[in-house]
Image (cartoon, coloured by chain):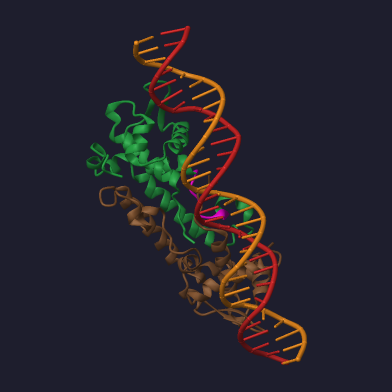
Chain colours: A green, B brown, C red, D orange
Amino acid sequence: MLMMILTKAGEYALRCMIYLAAHADQGITTRRDVAQAMNIPTSFLAKIAQRLARVGLLQIVQGARGGYRLLKPAIAISMLEVVEAVEGEIFLNECLLRKESCSRVGTCKAHIVWSKARTNLRATLQQATLADLLSSEEATSGSDTSDR
Amino acid sequence: MLMMILTKAGEYALRCMIYLAAHADQGITTRRDVAQAMNIPTSFLAKIAQRLARVGLLQIVQGARGGYRLLKPAIAISMLEVVEAVEGEIFLNECLLRKESCSRVGTCKAHIVWSKARTNLRATLQQATLADLLSSEEATSGSDTSDR
DNA sequence: GATTAATAATACTTTTTTAGTCTGATATAG
DNA sequence: CTATATCAGACTAAAAAAGTATTATTAATC
């Protein structure tokens, strides 16, 4: 049994956004490029990119010469946005998500602890922007075929 | 897609421990009592209790008049202990669990953010003891058949 | 405007995890 | 020695995650 909060989809979403941020100057980046460089299954990336596009994190350009492009500067995009775009809003337990599921909301102090933990976690992820991640990622992102 | 870190098993483990803590003075509590009061499937509780026993959080008494009993005072048991006994150690993403799984440990700043988030989360859960939870749970735990 | 190169959208499949059940064994009080 | 408990592990079912495939659409270019 292994507790894990970030699924592959979330991990791939982050990798994709990091790559796009690192190559933002080059205009449109093809899905294939992103997938190859960041080691993401291409068709899976398609699905993930659609979610990212739906919340306005990136623009999808169709047709020949199409691909992906960020819609905001890297400094204006938080890890939280990226992760939640793909995974849905983060909850640590069910009580907080569906209050009806637990008859003890109000009386039970565990709720308070979970709520606090959740708030902290989301705040930490919100504070980290793509630009922050990039500062040490650049070396990797430039000539990054040796990555796999 | 729903991000959730606490599984049913973890939720049940917490409920069980809270109930035992609230009834610690009564000596041994049967599995059936815990299950009924806290709305946990009895056979599932058996498995969960075994995990809790394995890490020394509770004592299982076999035979007629058997049941469960806490091994430590409620103030000495943290939510983190209980949850991790059942779910395994909390990790937020795979990179931190299996370093080999990610070629970018070291270069990638995302690791630092996840690591920090994880530390904070575990600290929050560690600080909360069963005794803390109990202070507002007592009202419920006393005559708690109306709970379901 | 036909061809080619790209993604869209959705349905499908496979794998893994979670949740729960069942069964034969074991232990103990009375 | 019988009734009442849990043990330990095998088993099953359901849900979620991960990935694939297929048909449709879009746009650049020749």
**Residue range (magenta):** A88-95
Location of residue A111 with respect to A87 vertically, above or below? below
The residue that appears at 64% across and 58% down in the rendered structure is A103
The residue that appears at 56% across and 67% down in the rendered structure is B13
Instruction: Report whether A113 appears left or right of D10.
Output: left
Q: Position of residue A85 (x, y in %)?
A: 46, 39
Instruction: Report whether A76 appears left or right of B38.
Output: left
Observer-nearest of A116 and B108: B108
Q: Quarter holding the C terminus of chain B?
A: bottom right
Instruction: Report whether A77 appears left or right of B7.
Output: left
Residue A14 in sight in this render: yes
Q: Position of residue B98 (x, y in %)?
A: 36, 57
The residue that appears at 64% across and 82% down in the rendered structure is B66
Per the picture, the main secondary structure of the magenta-coloured stretch is loop
The residue that appears at 55% across and 73% down in the rendered structure is B50
Residue B44 in magenta stretch? no
Instruction: Report whether A3 appears left or right of B9.
Output: left
Which corner quadrant of the image does residue B92 belong to?
A: bottom left
Location of residue A134 with respect to B100 vertically, above or below? above
Q: Position of residue A66 (x, y in %)?
A: 39, 24
Observer-nearest of C9 and B117: C9
Q: Position of residue A90 (x, y in %)?
A: 48, 48
Residue B139 in sight in this render: no
Observer-nearest of A36 and A120: A36
**Tag count:** 0
Location of residue B141 with respect to A124 vertically, above or below? below
Observer-nearest of B122 and D25: D25
